[in-house]
Amino acid sequence: MKAARLYVAQRLTAALMAPLVIGHLAVMFYATSNGLSAADILGRTSGSVGWALFYGVFAVAVAVHAAIGLRAISIEWAGASEQAADGLMLISGSVLALLGLRAVAAVVFPGAL
Amino acid sequence: MTASSGTDPLEVLVWRGKSDGRYQRFEVPRRDNQTVLDVVTFIQRECDPTVSYRFACRVGMCGSCGMTVNGRPRWTCRTHVSTVADDNQLQIGPLANLPLIKDLVVDMTRFFEKWQAAGGTFVPTKSRHDEIAMLRPSEPARVSADAAVECINCGVCFAACDTVRWNEDYLGPAALNRSWTLVNDTRDGGQAGRLQALAAHGGCTACHSHQSCAEHCPKGLNPTRSIAGLKRRTMAAYLKGEISR
């Protein structure tokens, strides 16, 4: 029952992202209003398990959520077959997860990448 | 009907032929309380008897007179010309999202096949020898079913739905709305198979909640709300393992 599985995955990741987006906006607001430099921010995120989990979960949720959405768009707007749409979903999800987790790693383990 | 004095005749464009056809212009006298169906009937009887269209009851019960009027799908027997005419002009075409047979007549086969695919058939659990089932109108399930049960299958929601246009496997708002009435019918014994069908590709999870169905439904129903209920029900069934994964 792939349709139900994808639906559940997209809704659960949406539920996850909602508080994470608010948290992210709050962090951005705090960082900019307090004039934190890149070094200040990296000083807080380096080696932080909490920030790694926060943005790691965020990046994975975005990758899953967006890839499922792109699958539906490719079927409905581009007339893609289910197989082609599944392929696009896997590739786009993998790329998004890779880029997102790489960015998380860059701020949690600066200098390691 | 009586003729309205001092009113210019309606300029009516009617779709003729199949999908490669064109609009044909007719002039129709204005009448008091004139419906769009009256206009089409006048054209067929007085201007061109080869115009094909479909109607039956003329009072908003049978659901057979759906057409596209000035760009919007409508039931034509209950649509007054005075409410839709744009500068005394009407453009009348067939319903969208269904194969065109001729002029204003579409093939509804696919529409009703989707009804069956969505588990729209009542599955009885009792025989005529059993006691008549007691249904309390105030029970939450019955309230949900009653809110959706007045569908007349006119196809207006199907023609208005973006997802139907984009995804040929999508069951569509009418079929899903019908299934919602049965999902809430405590007498029905076909829930497992129905939920399985509703959770499959093209089922209720394909709906994007654009709400065109609710916007256009001539009966004032809200199929989007019914489909949202089906999403909750199928999601719960999936998480509980009641439908196959």
Image (spheres, coloured by chain):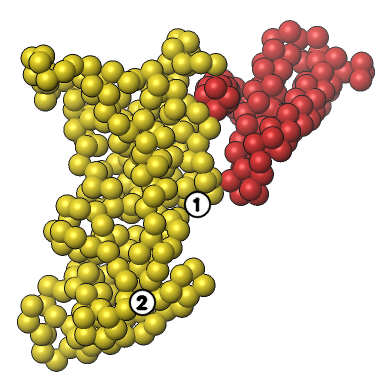
Q: CA distance from mark 2 to mark 1?
A: 22 Å
Q: Quadrant of residue A65?
A: top right
In the visual, does B203 lie left or right of A25?
Answer: left
Q: Nearer the viewer, residue B237 or B188?
A: B188
Assess whether mark 1 and mark 2 are in contact (beta carbons under 8 angstroms). no
Question: Circle 2 sits on which residue?
Answer: B14
Q: What residue lies at 27% left-to-right and 64% top-to-bottom?
A: B54
Question: Circle 1 sits on which residue?
Answer: B165
Identify the mark at residue A38; answer none if there is no mark.
none
Amino acid under label 2?
Val
Q: What residue lies at 18% left-to-right and 16% top-to-bottom?
A: B126
Q: Is residue B211 visible?
A: no
Image quarter in which the C terminus of chain B is found: top right
In the visual, does A40 lie left or right of B100?
Answer: right
Q: What residue lies at 82% left-to-right and 23% top-to-bottom?
A: A102
The chain in red: A
